[in-house]
Image (cartoon, coloured by chain):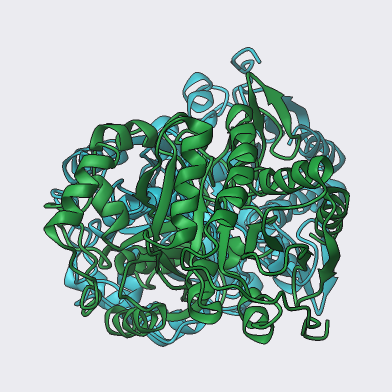
Chain colours: A cyan, B green
Amino acid sequence: MQRCGNWLAGQLRLAGLNRVRVLPTPRHPIVYGEWLGVPGRPTVLVYGHYDVQPAEPLRNWKHPPFGAEIHDGFLHGRGASDDKGQLFAHVKAMESLLQSTGRLPVNVKCLFEGEEEIGSPNLMPFLKRNRRALKADAAVMSDTRMLSPDRPALTYSLRGQLAVELEVKGPHHDLHSGNFGGAVHDPLQALCEIVAQLHDRDGHIAIPGFYDRVRHWSEAEHQYLARTGPSDAAILHEAGTATAWGERGHSLYERLTLRPSLSVTGIHGGHAGAGPKGVIPSQARVKLSFRLVPDQQPEEIERLFRRFVSKVVPRTVQVAVRTQIHSRPALVDRRHPAMRAAARAYRRVFGRAPVWVRSGGTIPVVSEFQRVLGIPTVLMGFASPGDSLHGPNEKFSLKNYKRGILTAIAFLEEFARSSGRGVARRKASVPGFQTPGP
Amino acid sequence: MQRCGNWLAGQLRLAGLNRVRVLPTPRHPIVYGEWLGVPGRPTVLVYGHYDVQPAEPLRNWKHPPFGAEIHDGFLHGRGASDDKGQLFAHVKAMESLLQSTGRLPVNVKCLFEGEEEIGSPNLMPFLKRNRRALKADAAVMSDTRMLSPDRPALTYSLRGQLAVELEVKGPHHDLHSGNFGGAVHDPLQALCEIVAQLHDRDGHIAIPGFYDRVRHWSEAEHQYLARTGPSDAAILHEAGTATAWGERGHSLYERLTLRPSLSVTGIHGGHAGAGPKGVIPSQARVKLSFRLVPDQQPEEIERLFRRFVSKVVPRTVQVAVRTQIHSRPALVDRRHPAMRAAARAYRRVFGRAPVWVRSGGTIPVVSEFQRVLGIPTVLMGFASPGDSLHGPNEKFSLKNYKRGILTAIAFLEEFARSSGRGVARRKASVPGFQTPGP
């Protein structure tokens, strides 16, 4: 991660950015660079993340996940879309402008982190500690998807996330399943019995109070989603399954965006190898990912989850809950000048207006940019359905990588023209960064 | 496995056995040796297995699982008790007699396999194919446990086993849990929902018909178990847990021996590493081990299990069931002369009579020795509770290893004296072995 951060900083210097630095955090460094050459013009905070999801299961990749091979017009590899490739489109956009014109149309601050996929734990305190240094009028990032390779989209809503790990502990050592099977509660069985109670038979999450703060949307919003969003068939096609699942009374697009969800993202316990093993494992672990919607709060959902688990856990085992990610859901005001500028940029490059979409995914920093810095985030995604984000065989279309560079350039130009249309003019600020000791 | 088999054959030759050979099977070889120097005396078939359980999780071992280190009077390592160490007591018993007296008190055929822990798939056809060559009056093996390090036990009942792996298949590739969570049935969740239905709330196995053939025992047998078997407290102490689980109305010893059970021996799916991963895995696998009691048949239980799964599986996922082990439960007649000879042998070495015990474990060949060869098996175990069979830190007391050698010697001597007490005299047979091609 350190080497990747250093490499990225070098690319920012090559692009022509100033004050480039690799800022330490307790874990993975934050890479910063800026160009503040047009005082009086708006300032854009360009965000991206250079960390990636785990690449396992490795045997399912057709090309090596860290080989960055190009085949058939796609860059193949972990992070090709999420988010190294999309991040890099912005770096190349700035390089193009700076190397060809010597300037950018607006002031820019780049903030690239290495912890997005683990909930941005160190970026949050960094934002709070450096409110002044990071002052800007809007943030922009490319870490979302288009509706299809030729249908651009601007994301205005993201789900939050609560990721937890539940450990079920039974006997203090692994036991012979013949010598003890039938007299001792198998921790894997207990784990299944707990997990099975998290949903009711209709696909609703069965934790009392879980839905209490889920926002109800207007009929107009539902109609807009139905008109503009992907069909159930398109979602199932991309998922590679014939059968939908989940809450009745909601389209799949609504289930993925307006409704919260709970995924079981990993279970491990007992014998992993081929063939049988006669063992009752002493412990088992399950990883759970709740996706949250306005106005659910991860802290409150975690409390409800812990209370539920403590009620359903049988007295024959012990449990421990570890929190891994707390991220709030985010909504962006579609009428903000930066959003309008982005829409015009898409029209210039793709020849058509972007569709406003909701995403079921989570980008932890978006709600924090709003809360801490008071700015909206323009979610200009260039990934496509089928790019296999988080799964094996992640890829990124080179055609849309290039259109991404052009759209990022157009956005900076269009946002410059927003001056006087509601964007505050501020003197670019250059205080030093406050970082914690290593 | 081949090298281990060859090494073991070398040890049999050193002991002084004849016609020692390493017989190929489609998987792991069978090691055979014999000494037929007393025609007219009974013949004992000495059985053992040189394969072991998987050693994982490796990090939980205090000493290397394949280091065979001696500490505090114990041999530490995978297989120390189950079954390499116990098997070797018989080899050393024969070596002792042959090297000091030049003969054995009875005829002996040694049959050591390398597939016991995977259900002896190739030994079964070997037995059927070589009925005449393996002709004997009784089998003896040491692959069970005493009640405590100084309380010898003769096992007269074993549970059978049905081991299966259930695979739950969902989307055809791993999915982003944000982009798809709530619209697609998570295979790990579906797996938990299926596994949770295998038991009812009282700890009974919920598969219709599962208990239909479970034998009812006389009040006398229940009283004998209560009088001679380990207490609930002793079983829980060995298990390293404070809380019992399972069928009410049965002592823990009864739950482990008279009653069938179902253990979840492994679940694996999704992200295994540290930290979170936002993924819905495309598939998940669970390994299940049913322990069966008279008169349950593994084939019938498998049919009932498959029918149950096909009824409860939601239409949102596919399932596949793979069978790994089919083993019948076994009962040995306590009045057989070989059993009486073993009891006298224990009295000579330990100074006390062995307790007749039931074991919850499975040794696939025992029921087959009865069915195919028509002989009972003397289960002379020298392992102890606390030896951690199948778990990390398996060990074997050197003191009981030595007492095992002495008891094995005494057994051969005592069984020789059984001649005329109901043991048929047969001419030792020496036909060639029928083995399948490699």
**Residue at 39% over, 53% down:** B359
**Residue at 39% over, 38% down:** B353
Q: Name which quarter of the figure residue A437 lies in.
A: top right
Q: Is residue A90 above or below residue B162?
A: above
Between residue B418 and residue B25, name the one nearer to us: B418
Between residue B2 and residue A413, name the one nearer to us: B2
Q: Position of residue A185 (x, y in %)?
A: 30, 47
**Residue at 29% over, 35% down:** A299
Can residue B319 be seen in the rendering of this structure?
yes
Can residue B280 be seen in the rendering of this structure?
no
Horizontal relation, residue B180 to residue A207: left or right? right
Q: Is residue A227 above or below residue A284?
A: below
Q: Position of residue B302 (x, y in %)?
A: 39, 80
Between residue B101 and residue B129, name the one nearer to us: B101
Q: Quadrant of the N terminus of chain B?
A: bottom right
**Residue at 70% over, 62% down:** B107
Q: Name which quarter of the figure residue A342 lies in.
A: bottom right
Q: Quadrant of the C terminus of chain B?
A: bottom right
Q: Position of residue A329 (x, y in %)?
A: 35, 48
Q: Is residue A332 above or below residue B24?
A: above
Horizontal relation, residue B241 to residue B269: left or right? left
Between residue A258 and residue B83, name the one nearer to us: B83
Horizontal relation, residue B420 to residue B209: left or right? right
In the image as oriented, which residue stretches furthest toward the front? B420
Q: Is residue B230 above or below residue A399?
A: above
Q: Position of residue A435 (x, y in %)?
A: 61, 17
